[in-house]
Amino acid sequence: MDLKDLDRAFEKMIKQFPQARRRLVEECGEKMYQKVLSNISQVDEKTGNLRKGVKKAVGSRGGYSAVRPDYKIAPHTHLIENGHKIVRNGKVVGWVSGKHMYRNALNELANELEQDCEKMLDELVGDFNG
């Protein structure tokens, strides 16, 4: 490979990277979204607002993906996620442990998401080598 071939390969990789990154970010966001919904389905909730309140957002330029609660739909999400005190007649009588639907989703998917990133980079570099 001479210098001109190397330059063309770099140019090709630079052009492909933004689309590949956006696709990766969207796929990772969808996996997180589905995992959070799966975790919520294991929580005993009666109204369905907890599930309806899960929102996925992708940055306008594809640089990030976020899965977060919409507190207008499910204002109690933080109580279920993190736990809360049980108060009766102004006195704390106990504690309800958090269900950690969001945190557990991230912990469970961390390795898989990292592998997805490595795969995307390998594909780009593989194109570069080829």
Image (tube, rainbow, N blue to C red):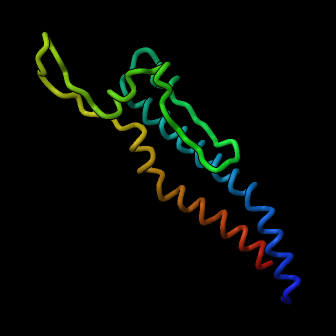
Specify the farthest residue to the top: 89
Specify the farthest residue to the right: 4
| The quarter of the displayed image where residue 94 is located | top left
| The quarter of the displayed image where residue 87 is located | top left
Specify the farthest residue to the bottom: 2
Q: Position of residue 124 (x, y in %)?
A: 73, 68
| Image quadrant occupied by the C terminus | bottom right
Q: Position of residue 83 (x, y in %)?
A: 27, 31
| Image quadrant occupied by the N terminus | bottom right
Give left or right: position of 114 versus 100.
right
| The quarter of the displayed image where residue 76 is located | top left
All told, the count of numbered labels is 0
Q: Position of residue 72 (x, y in %)?
A: 49, 19
Q: Considering only vertical position in the picture, is 129 above or below 89?
A: below
Query: What residue is rendered at 53% in x and 38% in y?
Result: 67
Give left or right: position of 36 versus 121.
left
Q: Position of residue 71 (x, y in %)?
A: 46, 23
Query: What residue is rendered at 45% in x and 21% in y?
Result: 74
> Which is nearer the eye, 70 or 129?
70
Query: What residue is rendered at 53% in x and 43% in y?
Result: 32
